[in-house]
Image (cartoon, rainbow, N blue to C red):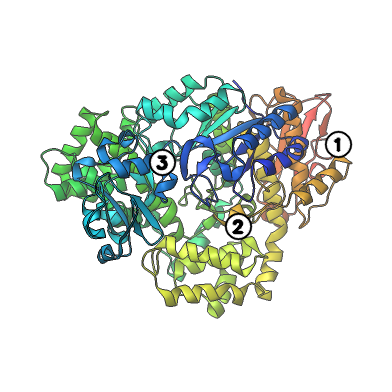
Amino acid sequence: MTVPESTYRVQLRPEFTFADAAGIAGYLRDLGIGALYASPVLDAAPGSTHGYDVVDPTRARPALGGEGARQELSALLKELGLGLVVDIVPNHMSVEVPKANRWWWDVLKHGRDSEYASYFDIDWDRGPLLLPVLGDDDAVAELTVEGDELVYYDHRFPLAPGTESGTPQEVHERQHYRLFGWRRGNAELTYRRFFDITNLAAVRVEDPKVFAATHGEVLRWVADGDVTGLRVDHPDGLADPGGYFRRLRANAPNAWIVAEKILHPGEPLPQSWPVDGTTGYDALREIAGVFVDPAGEPDFTALANELGVKTGYHRVEAEARRLVTDRILVAEVRRIAALLRDVDPEAARAAVAETMIAFPVYRSYLPEGAAHWAVAIEGARQARPDLAEALAALDAQVRAEPDGELATRIQQTSGMVVAKGTEDTTFYRYTRFAALNEVGGNPDRFGLDVEEFHRLAAEREAGYPAAMTTLTTHDTKRSEDTRARMAVLAELPGEFADAVRRWSARHGIDEPSLNLLAWQTLVSTWPIEPARLRDYLDKAAKEAKLRTSWTDHDEAFEAAVAAWPDVVVNDPDVAAFVARIERPGWSNSLGQKLVQLTAPGVPDVYQGTELWDFSLVDPDNRRPVDYAVRREILARILDGELPEIDASGAAKLLVVHRALKLRQEHPALFRGYRPLRAEGPAAAHCLAYTRSADLAVAVTRLPVGLEAGGGWRDTVLPLPDGVWTDVLTGREVTSDLAALFDRYPVALLVRGDA
């Protein structure tokens, strides 16, 4: 099996193509990276900036350079000794531009008789395929016919053979599809989609024929040795994730395969999946958590309550999930409820909705996940005792037929309810302390203690040592350095609360959740351009769905939010507070990065984050990366420079480079895991461990409290006998932590000549 020592994620797009990726390959090799990790490379919707909207899985995307450029990139990576990991999207395809997706176009043209009709998850028994693309239902009057196409402004649809005569409206009535108002889509859609995005139609990869058609090209690249690893997007949407991964593994026996499976705390990865692990959100939660001071929780809760932000997390979450089941994924819930036998339709709908609202994880994997299913049913019973009979029937049918359509569709949909309700709604409403509001995170759990971190790291080494670990992805709510600086606030909760009171009195946003989120975001990304902050707050407000949303706008509120950044980005009081937290934030950034790069798992470096990166949620995290600056700093480090910890971020690049190079040149050092425990008055501020007997890692945590307590004083780190050298500085070290951390707040130690 080809397991990389590390990966480097790049976001390919028409402005950053295969050729551009080839242009940084030498830099990645020098940095110490083991494999380039690319966003989806198959042909995507016209103009796509991310590639997850595939339209043709049988070819490399022409907008990235096409097959020739892909081959050139692969050849160069092989020459440089780098692997190539690609992101694949088995769950759905883009149908936004029907003509761009020849399979979908054929389905629209021929209906159930299309050879591709079985490729998509369509409920044909409900009549014509419903497409919610019109401004409203009356817009049918605006349809025209041009040749063999039905036209609605920029939208074009094929005509079934022999249906061209008559008025456009008469022609429309003869098609295998019906166009209707977009606002009815959530309630009446007749095909499964990705979340609430009607332009992404679900694909039935559980059918071997469909699997072969959608995966054949990528698997050819794997067989040819061009691709060494696969990152699988959204397996929770699949009918049979375990079966899918078994088929994928059978076709790619030597590939490194990681699943974008978001695990809740304590949730194991299904043992039946033949994968190397997750894409690392569980590791992110653990690593980031150990840098959060739990002592800050009471003050943050009090501040949130004072400002009017709801602090009952599970109640906020249930309300948000109910919004999803009752107003957004209405068609999906109704389709599931119709499969429940001998139950009143409304009671069935309510029972299905309440069960998904109560899910303790994204998805149960029956029969393996029977315990999670039981928790969901019991939670629904407690919330709605009046549904006891319907819930009993639902539970009985699912348990009796764990592979049946009812059980399958509930599992496919529960993850969407959790993601839309929790990640995409609750995380923007429950803004008590936003550093915890991360994909895979638990906003109700304020920090992680060192001993629990050690236990979880040892479990990863024992169970999934080749799992990916990450601190930033294209999907995280904020970048690692933004989160690291935000974590400092937990050490200064009183000071921050006082500041927020002052600032809000002058320039508060008239919605409590967004107001508290906005101030946390401002100080954690400062200095930030007003346009970036404006775009972020607009998205946050719409995702929260409290005062405005993507579909129902409050224009006056949106205008007030849009005006806010220009008022606050140069506030001297805010600048003074940022100066207080900037250096501790750098310490947190270096600490969490070295832990991620050296703890069990395969570390991924998201594009550009080898320097400070204070990004926010997408699309902010897809901004272009200045590789010329990074090359220049790396060249200085290769010449022996030990950079200062300053705003340039060069010290972070030093840590990344030295850790990656050590992994690359001495992989055997990174095996095993044992805690190291500091001794002395400041021991709680050191997180340390060994991997092999000859490798030790030590980092500073909670730096504000450390300084307030008088520094390291007589605290020591008892190292195993021998001569230890810090790879970051090249110096021999002793057990004295004040001396060990006098240059950097982190240390990467090797013993002897290792």
Distance, label 3 to label 2, CA atoms, is 47 Å
Residue 156 % position (x, y): 37, 54
- On the picture, is 438 further left or further right than 96? right
In the figure, residue 751 lies in which quadrant?
top right
Camera-side residue of 122 and 550: 122
Q: Which residue is mark 1?
A: 730
Residue at the image point whose x is 57% and y is 63% from the top: 520
Q: Circle 1: is it few (<14), some (14-19), or many (20+) Cα within 10 Å? A: few
Confirm whether residue 32 shows in the render: yes
Q: Which residue is mark 2?
A: 486
Residue type, mark 2 in image: Met
Q: Which residue is mark 3?
A: 102
In the figure, residue 687 lies in which quadrant?
top right
Image quarter of the C terminus: top right
Residue type, mark 3 in image: Arg
Camera-side residue of 38 and 586: 38
- On the picture, is 589 further left or further right than 744? left
First in residue order: circle 3 vs circle 2: 3
